Amino acid sequence: MTGLRVEGLAKSFGQTRVLDGLDLTVTDGITAVLGPSGCGKTTLLRLVAGFLDPDGGTIAIGGRVVAGACRSVPARARKVGYVPQEGALFPHLDVSANIGFGLPRAERRGARVTEMLDLVELPAVVAHRYPHELSGGQQQRVALARALAPAPTLVLLDEPFSSLDAGLREDTGRAVARALRASGATALLVTHDQGEALSLADQVAVMSRGRFLQVSSPADIYLRPASPDVAGFVGHATLLAGSAAGQQASSDLGDVPLLDPHDGPVLLAIRPEQVTVAPSGGVRAEVLDVSYFGHDATVRARIEGSDAVVIARVPAGGVPDPGSTVCLRVSGAVLAFPQGDGR
Ligand SMILES: Nc1ncnc2c1ncn2[C@@H]1O[C@H](COP(=O)(O)OP(=O)(O)OP(=O)(O)O)[C@@H](O)[C@H]1O
């Protein structure tokens, strides 16, 4: 059974069209909706949850149309679990009562609550603590346990880790993904963090200005982006004009091998890890700035005699100084998008 099917979904606020005919099918597992701030991610989630009505299109959950086609099933009857940005636990209820909130009265302190605590990998002792006695990561796990307790068909998660610091964010993300998979629920995870989307989801829907640019597996999104926009947004590709002849293209970075054959003008999408930075051997470039991450660093360098700025990833031990001159070389075949006459 299909967890969620969205067809031609449209929504405007006043004169602003926020969603512009979205189509999305989520069969099972975790689908991440990835896009920049303001592109319409939360609006999509609110429409699916039933907090807003669409202007056009349909939403079906578990095979049942819940919005559109002259129908609007109220939020509470959609069998959807919702995990908001900061958990939004009830502060006056303990963990056990928070988790049991959506359950029939007789089950509110029963085995289902214990089962849910176990699922989100929290010890039974936290059951009688209040939200202010939990860490941020524990609160998000309780929020997930509360959403999963009534066994929803679909779980919606709206930037659930955004208030957590980096280390906790990764651990909580992995724990939440494990719990979602173990529960068997279909999940839609909204995020603007590409690492989170690529590492946690089975399917990634890349969104921009109310439309999906590509819906595919994490590997496809990264290795086979559908457009220069997707390549630039997910993984920070350098987009460089080139001229292709078969399996090779000439560019400001010299001759580069192509993943697929093309002829004529192309836009090359070169990943930072495909650019080698060395003191000699390659195209000369001036280092503009360096972002140091500990395990490695990202270098932005402008090619001499050109406006082209290239992003390269270098190992932590070989970081050049800003203002220095380096040599850039492309290693491995790169993706090319036909442009103009070559289209
Ligand atoms: N109730 C509303 N009334 C008017 N405009 C709204 C309303 N809700 C959202 N918008 C506008 O719709 C656009 C999309 O908002 P939305 O919250 O869906 O984006 P988002 O991708 O979730 O952004 P973020 O990542 O910053 O949360 C924004 O321009 C926002 O200002």
Image (tube, helix red, strand yellow):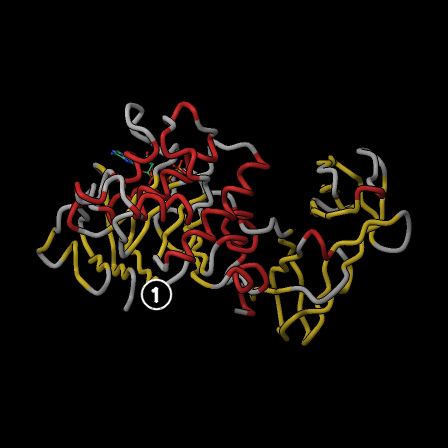
> Residue 5: x percent and y percent?
27, 62
The amino acid type found where label 1 is placed reads Thr
> Residue 314: x percent and y percent?
77, 47
Split into 4 quadrants, where in the image is the N terminus?
bottom left
Is 307 or 291 nearer to us in this picture?
A: 291
**107 left or right, relative to 130:** left
Query: Where is residue 184, by image quadrant?
Result: bottom left
- Near mark 1 (Cα within 10 A), the count class, few <14, some 14-19 or many ≥20, is some
Residue on which disc 1 sits: 27
**Res. 155 visible in picture:** yes
**Residue 120 higher or lower than 215, as above or below:** above
Q: Residue at x 18, y 43 (%)?
A: 106
Q: Residue at x 50, y 53 (%)?
A: 200
Q: Residue at x 28, y 27 (%)?
A: 93
Is 224 or 263 nearer to us in this picture?
A: 224
Query: Where is residue 58, by image quadrant?
Result: bottom left
